[in-house]
């Protein structure tokens, strides 16, 4: 099992802020999904971002600068996301994203060992409301 120094787990390694989010951006995103519910596609006081709108936001860095490179193999792919939804994103919101390494683990499959690194993106708005937490799972092969 690849060992990772505990100092890497849970420590914020990047912060980014986006916005303000416009009504046009929210509507365009929702329509691109084929969404028709008025709360996602019609400007007005009820307009809010589709729950998956939060995936548009991420940090500038993929990993901490001092993250062990031996854990990051040459081949990699997105191995999925877990999303915890909070307060809907609304027009005018500033979205603050903090990034941290949440988990590192290995699995052995029929083609060999794979290392999984989970980077957590925690999102809040300008009022400090929790918008979403996304655990982005990447798989690396040696």
Image (cartoon, helix red, strand yellow):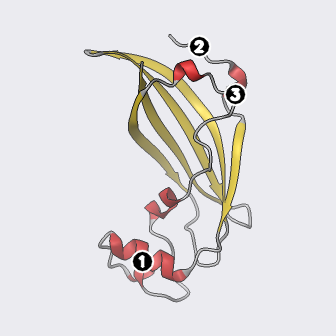
37 on left or right of 121: left
Q: Nearer the viewer, mark 3 or mark 1?
A: 3
Badge 3 element: loop
Tell which residue pokes out farthest to the top in this image: 1
Badge 1 element: helix
**Residue 120 occupies which quadrant of the picture?**
top right
Label placed on residue 66: 3
Q: Residue at x 65, y 74 (%)?
A: 20
Badge 2 element: loop
Q: Point out the tag, 3 or 2, that comes first from the N-terminus.
A: 2
Assess disc 1: are there few (<14), some (14-19) or many (≥20) residues with their C-alpha within 10 Å of its C-alpha.
some
Assess disc 2: are there few (<14), some (14-19) or many (≥20) residues with their C-alpha within 10 Å of its C-alpha.
few
**Residue 12 occupies which quadrant of the picture?**
top right
Instruction: Using the image as rendered, state which of residue 114 and residue 102 is in the foreground.
Output: 114
Q: Are marks 3 and 1 in contact (CB under 8 Å)?
A: no
Assess disc 3: are there few (<14), some (14-19) or many (≥20) residues with their C-alpha within 10 Å of its C-alpha.
few
Q: Is residue 113 visible?
A: yes
The residue tagged 1 is 28
Q: Nearer the viewer, mark 3 or mark 2?
A: 3
Q: Residue at x 42, y 72 (%)?
A: 29
Q: Position of residue 52 (x, y in %)?
A: 44, 60
Q: Position of residue 53 (x, y in %)?
A: 47, 64
Q: Position of residue 94 (x, y in %)?
A: 67, 68
Label placed on residue 3: 2
Q: Residue at x 57, y 58 (%)?
A: 86
Q: Position of residue 4 (x, y in %)?
A: 62, 18
Work out which quarter of the rendered image holds the C terminus and state it: top left
Position of residue 69 relative to residue 56, above or below, is above
């Amino acid at each position: 099992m690849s060992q990772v120094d505990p100092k890497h787990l849970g420590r914020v390694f990047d912060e980014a802020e986006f916005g303000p989010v416009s009504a046009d951006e929210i509507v365009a995103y929702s329509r691109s999904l084929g969404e028709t519910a008025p709360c996602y596609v019609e400007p007005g006081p009820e307009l809010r971002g589709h729950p998956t709108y939060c995936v548009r936001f991420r940090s500038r860095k993929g990993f901490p600068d001092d993250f062990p490179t031996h854990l990051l193999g040459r081949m990699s792919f997105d191995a999925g996301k877990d999303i915890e939804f909070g307060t809907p994103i609304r027009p005018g919101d500033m979205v603050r994203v903090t990034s941290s390494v949440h988990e590192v683990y290995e699995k052995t499959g029929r083609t060999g060992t794979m290392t999984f690194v989970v980077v957590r993106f925690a999102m809040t708005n300008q009022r400090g409301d929790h918008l979403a937490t996304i655990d982005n799972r990447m798989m690396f092969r040696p």
